[in-house]
Image (cartoon, rainbow, N blue to C red):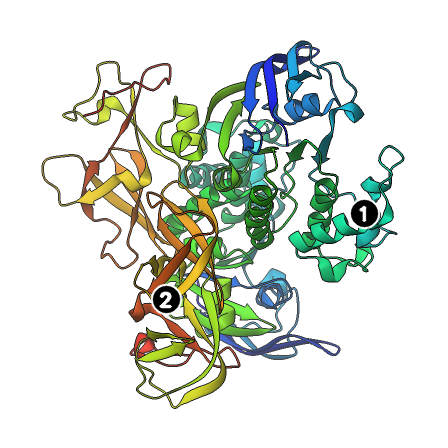
Amino acid sequence: MAEIVLRHVGKRFGEIEAVHDLSLKIASGEFVVLLGPTGAGKTTTLRLIAGLEYADEGAIAIDDRDVTREPPAARDIAFVFQQYSLYPHLTVYDNLAFPLRSPARRLPKPEIKKRVEAIAELLHISSKLGNRATRLSGGEMQRVAIGRALVRQPAIYLMDEPLSSLDAKLRAELRLELKRIQVELGATILYVTHDQIEAMTMASRIGVVREGRLLQLGTPREIYENPRDLYVASRLGMPPINLLPAELVPGVPMPDRTKTIGVRTEHLQIAKPNGGPVGRVRRIEHLGDQNHVHIDYRGQPLITLADPHRPLAAGQEVGLELVDPLYFDASGERIAVPAG
Amino acid sequence: MAQIRVEGLRKAFQDFIAVEASNFTVEDGSFFVMLGPSGCGKTTTLRMIAGLELPTEGRILLDGEDVTFRRAAQRDIAFVFQLFALYPHMNVAQNIGFPLKSQGVSRGEIKSRVRETARLLRIEEILTSKVSKLSSGDRQRVALGRAIIRRPKAFLMDEPLGALDAEFRHLMCGELRELHDRIKATTVYVTHDQLEAMSMADQIAVMNRGRIEQIGNPQEIYDRPVSMFVANFIGSPPMNFLRFEGSVKRGDRAVRLADASIAVPEVREDGASGSLALGVRPEHVTLSDHAPLRGRVFGTEYLGTTQIVTVDVEQGQVKARLSARLRVTLGETVGLAFRPENLVLFNPTGRALDSALYQGNGHG
């Protein structure tokens, strides 16, 4: 497995700057997820690394070797796309073996068999090896597509929303599988998605991207607990972080330049009214394991979490406590607060 | 607004029975969700209520009046499909007013009702905008406006949010429910998404293979599922099932899983034996060094507030919802403890055994 280094990479398509001054180092064996909306430059970044596009600026190195100008085939990269494209007339076995039979590789038959069977085992599709690709369920097809990337044992895997075409249950299952396989193989993966759950659950580190720029890079925990600006803070968390204009909460101590206060749903706590902020319960949403309590605070909608059996009713007035709030200035930048 | 009663409803398409023995009442002003996988009969039931499909047997009553064989147009019910279809060449006000215009309502009346509808939906400021310029949220609101302006007796909605991604869908659920709280229109809503159902419903009917498995409010269905099907369909992640061979009898307060004795709510029926299952929700699992039931950590999924830890045990896989602060390492051996008062036992056919958990809560 290999390390990838991007240094000041830029890419334009006419007027549009798809990727702006991107520097990123992915360590060998790391699972990095780029999280961002459509048009953030995620897919372009993958295509630049794969060699399907060439960078206008900057350099890309794989294991200290500059590959910026190298053709895709010389880069030893496997790409998994959103839509699995299997050979419908071939069996699962032949689909998996296909990359190993290419003239460039031409592995001996027993070696191919060994690798295909090992990958099938890993993906729990051993019993399907003799099936035609068209006889598989969606989840199985996507496993085969991932398997076809894995079987080559490339230096790096690039994955572009590979789970997005699957239903929720399968997606949850494959998230866990993919992470397990990555750990077992020690694979280096760069994965792009707009789904925060995929990013949080699988990534060693998440890169939050927007409009071609990398806003913050860190472990899921760092990004969630220590966002550097309002955008990153709102990007992670379901329900999203509560944002309050500073002038709505007089009396709460905060840094001078504070314009917005951010409070995660689990940090907005319901208390007996005691002189602090008081809100009114608008609606209680039962999700089974917990309730989402929707609160109106001086015209501002807030959401907090509560035990499903805690007695609360719409219309009730409740005291609000802000635990570990985050402070943001007028430009949306986070204001650091000294610990203690 | 209206009450909807469905009595002994059945629908067969040649040999295929789409809906069978369906009985329920949607109270006036209530938000009723029919939840189930594709092919469970939920859309067919909705189409019979709408008058788009005739039942093979049974009756449908709207405010006590039998409308079973009345045509759709005579039922005063608004049927809302996916919420996106708008007329692109009309502005927002024209889109919302269109159903009245086609009914021949006067211009003055249309104008005032469009205003009132826009106020309910909080979209007054975009009334003159072109629909092609709108955000997807506003498009949904306009489509809803077109349904509510007719002031029908009831709304029937068939997966109206199906085309949206998960985060936005949940946001729209909140808006739909708040709109419902303002206009209190009787609503029957069909979906395969348990989160939509939990989030919005007063009552949920969980359907499976043409039959209603359980009707109840969201918390009841979540806490006291009548079957493995319901327990597995509701919750994300769903209820864990630990499968074991054994027998339980009336009065039992514990079951044996291999070497472990697990406390359960007291069994209140004659019992069962054979391939049984113990059901436990992820948030009722804790890690405990002393617990006799042990397994290996297969995966951890960080979610910010909480994390989902998946553990392989002899009886299957168990997912636990734990604090995100807890450090858990892949491959480590852990003990699993369960909150006894919330456990459910299932018999070999997948039906939940009656127990102290269900006491006084109309089991079945």
x, y (%) of residue A227? 38, 26
Q: Foreground: B42 or A67?
A: A67
Q: Quadrant of residue A333?
A: top left
List the residue tagged with mark 1. Answer: A112
Q: Quadrant of the N terminus of chain B?
A: bottom left
Whether A221 is drawn above or below A41: the answer is below
The dot on residue B223 is 2
Q: Is residue B290 left or right of residue A193?
A: left
Instruction: Specify the quadrant of the image occupied by residue A18.
Output: top right
Q: Is residue B162 visible?
A: yes
Give SS at disc 1: helix
* Mark 1 Cα shell of 10 Å, populated few (<14), some (14-19), many (≥20): many
Q: Position of residue A262 (x, y in %)?
A: 31, 29
Residue type at mark 1 is: Ile
Chain under callout 2: B
Q: Is residue A34 left or right of residue B14?
A: left
At 33% across and 64% down in the image, what residue appears? B337
- Residue drawn at x 66%, y 45% is A165
Please state which of the two labelled residues, at mark 1 or mark 2, is closer to the viewer.
1
Q: Is residue A64 above or below residue A207?
A: above
How crowded pointer 2 is (Cα within 10 Å; few <14, some 14-19, many 20+) is rated as some
Residue at x 52%, y 70% (from the top left corner): B229
Q: Quadrant of the C terminus of chain B?
A: bottom left
